[in-house]
Amino acid sequence: MKAIHYSDSAWKAVLAPLGGNLIRLQWRARELDILRYPHAYRLLEEKPEVWGLPPLFLPNRIEDGTFTLNGIRYSLPLNDRNGHNHIHGWLHQAYWSLSLKGNSLKAEYEHRHSEIWPHDFHAEVYYHFYSSTVRQEVSFRNTGKIPMPFLFGQHSAFRLPWKDSTVQVTLAPHRIVLNARNLPSGTYEPIKTNCFDNSSGPVSLHAENLPDSSQFTGAVIRHPAKNIEIVYSVDPRYRFWMLWNWQGKRKMFCAEPQTCTVNAVKAAKLLGDTGVKLLAPGEEIRLETSIAVRPL
């Protein structure tokens, strides 16, 4: 299946079948590409998690790729080059079915139980385009006969094309310290700032998503060079963030909302409630985010 190109008076967008990923989003009024996009499809195939809005199921790392939950033992591939872990799941590497209707794009994925994931489920991602906002709806429905662990995140890759571009994120005051394998260590450290730019150096930060005084949860990407800001509003059920900027050398910033912590299925003794949810047979969960453009 080919990618679907969408265009209206406000937006241009490209939805790719690989990962059901919105790999390009352009605000037409300023010809501003909001997301980091691949100039060639092979680049998306080589590293699908660093372009656009790839879905991560399961998000980030699981220690040793194995865990037991609700009497079921799970064994996932050890695909983390920097540690003996599983990382990011497989949905961002799977091919989704795509469709376009009116001002909405839709990606669907149907999973039948397998060695990797012994559950049946149906996933959908909608993108609805409005004059200054793109609204995303993600849904997962357990279509199997046994409870299914639900752990989800997005590797949201925003462009920071100018020296004065910044990202401000709703963070708790303390970070979850990760060890040498990039897994929670059980300790916390104060966060010095919740605002980052191209001079911040390497960023790899894991923390809770704490609403601000207006109850907003998300990230604000400001581009003074274009006199606009991008408001990335995320569902409060994304209770955690992973912030990452690929060593700070590519003029990009991933503000990754996650429903759970890193290594959530194994870190409860260290962190308490890690956000693991069990979907009952027939149960569905829906998560909403939006990307809005407004003047500074």
Image (cartoon, rainbow, N blue to C red):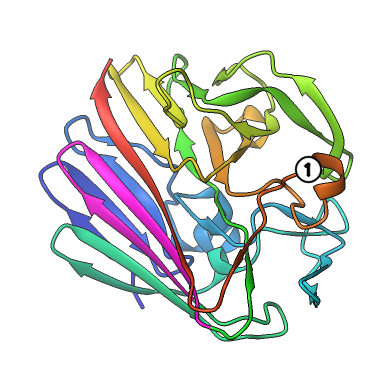
Looking at the image, is 284 positioned above or below residue 48? Answer: below
What kind of residue is marked 1? Gly
User: Which corner quadrant holds the N terminus?
Assistant: bottom left
Residue at point 39% right, 36% down? 233
Residue at point 73% right, 47% down? 262
Disc 1: CA contacts within 10 A as few (<14), some (14-19) or many (>=20)? few
The range drawn in magenta is: 122-143
Residue 129 coordinates in the image, percent (x, y): 21, 49
Looking at the image, is 77 positioned above or below residue 87? Answer: below
Report which residue position mark 1 lands on. 272
Residue 213 coordinates in the image, percent (x, y): 45, 17
Residue at point 66% right, 50% down? 275
How many marks overall? 1
Q: In this view, does 8 lie to the left or right of 244?
A: left
Magenta stretch: helix, strand or loop mostly: strand
Q: Is residue 41 magenta?
A: no
Residue 294 coordinates in the image, percent (x, y): 24, 25
Residue at point 39% right, 73% down? 108
